[in-house]
Amino acid sequence: MRNWLAHVIERLAIAMDDSIPASTVHSYLRKHIDTVIPASLDAQILIDQARIHAAFLLDNPFSEFTGEELLRDLLPVQEACTDWLENRRGERMVRWKGVQRGTSEHMLALFLDEDDALADEVYAWLQALLRHVEVRRKAALYLLPDGDADPERIEQSQTAYLFSRAAIRWRDARFLNAALKLNDWSFPTFRSGPRTVAGCWYVLALAGTEHTLEQMTC
Amino acid sequence: MLKLVLFAPTDRSLYSRLLAELIVCEEGFVLGGIVARRMLSWKRIRGELRRDGPRLLRKVARKLVLGEEHTETAQPDSLAALAFLEGLRAPTLSRLARQHGVPYMKTIDHNQPVVEEALRAMAPDIIVFTGGGLIRKNILAVPTLGILNCHAGLLPQYRGMDVVEWPVLEAEDAVPQIGLTCHYMDKGVDTGPILTLRRMQVFPGDDFKTLRRRIEPEMVRLMMATLRGIEAGDVTPLEQADEDGRQYFVMHPRLKMYAERKLAQLSNSLRSLQ
């Protein structure tokens, strides 16, 4: 009886486990990397970049990725990011409930700019974002003030991508850990394929995370 | 003479029962009360399921359904073996409290006003924390010395969750920093003043299960040694600075697989040196 009950609980635990195995991630990327469908003409550039970027990350797990300037073109310009950061000094960027819209793209742009003067500040904010994601889990990254499903998915994938890069820069596997979780939680949304801009970012986040995993564990 | 109160995660926790038993049998301590969390509370189950997910179910299966803790007496380095050696007989904390005439209460949450009220009446020097969630300011302020916790990681570096696995994952080619730390709790996660710490070694053939099994009885020993040290005035709390360590979270299964591989390599290389 005890063994039977333990067996039932184990089956339940397997059913509840939302982590995606490596084989599923890899076959998903191989299958969908070339079939990202443009949602609009504006999204075409992002889609092209996502394909180039993801394909590189997937095919060159042991190489340092140097093509991030391509991605930089899709993000707010440097002055806009500095202004954005300036306007948020002295307040909490990450709140218990969620984040302001655009947080991840500005943070990602600031991260890619590698401005030494801002490095400590960016790292401190990334740590706050990491804590928020780990504590709030699937409820994390709600877009304040009112939430909005599609931008929220973009926010999640941009954050996962940002974390995957931050893990390498600071040799901090906690960021990789959070990126893996964010990707797992978004997987059901994009299971059938990345058909939107949010899907593009998801492909990028997956490829970036797999690349970082290879770099840090092999 | 130190007046203690014990906080327990459940009425059946072996770690809590063993510590309670050792405390009541030791001169120099008075166990003024035991506060145990109710096992079945919706708030608790929801919170723990959200945090631990399938791991919680596996823990339930292992501890409550199969009773693994109690059948592990054959392993000489286990908590169950130590409990057997120390003559622990009471199957629950409530029974142990009755046997020794210690006031006992059950609660949904250790932070409830009713618990605070009872604690103020007990006026403990130290609350011995053996699990049961985050402790809020109102309770932190009650004991004259503090709330004592034994954390299964080396502080200040390794705060938070899965702190046996994270040092192995991060060790590169060095020896992983595994161990235990007794500290007073504060409003942060494992950021309170450090009292004592004990380093643990990896032995040939070790995996995470054997490592954790060896850590559990050491937690009891270190907790008792720390209480004795406080009573004798030999232990001085050492403040931690925020930037001295990192907070770790539940490890993703794919990183855990990698950590398991690394630990297997390490323990195999130790075996080959024998």
Image (spheres, coloured by chain):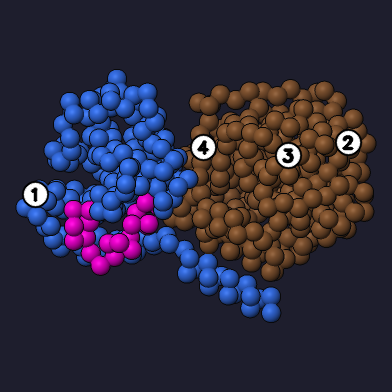
Chain colours: A blue, B brown
Q: Secondary structure at mark 2?
A: strand
What residue does disc 4 label?
B247
In this orientation, which residue lies closer to the viewer: A208 or A187? A187
Residue B106 relative to residue B270: left or right = right
Mark 4: secondary structure: strand
Q: Nearer the viewer, mark 4 or mark 2?
A: 2
The answer to whether residue B226 is seen in the rendering is: no
Q: Amino acid at mark 1?
A: Asp
Question: Magenta-highlighted stretch: main secondary structure?
Answer: helix
Return the residue at label 1.
A42
C-alpha separation, residue under disc 4 versus residue under disc 2: 33 Å
* Residue bearing the label numbered 2: B29
Residue drawn at x 51%, y 37% is B247
Left or right of residue B21: residue A36 = left
For residue A61, side relative to residue B271 (left or right)? left
- Residues at marks 2 and 3 on the same chain: yes
Do circles 3 and 1 both sit on a common chain?
no
Q: Is residue B8 above or below residue B123?
A: below
Q: Pointer 2 and pointer 3: residues touching (CB < 8 Å)?
A: no
Task: Name the residue: 63% across, 75% down.
Answer: A5
Q: Chain of mark 4?
A: B
Cβ atoms under marks 3 and 4 closer than 8 Å: no
Q: Is residue B64 above or below residue A112?
A: below
Label 3 resides on the chain identified as B
What is the CA distance from the residue labelled 3 to the residue labelled 1? Answer: 59 Å
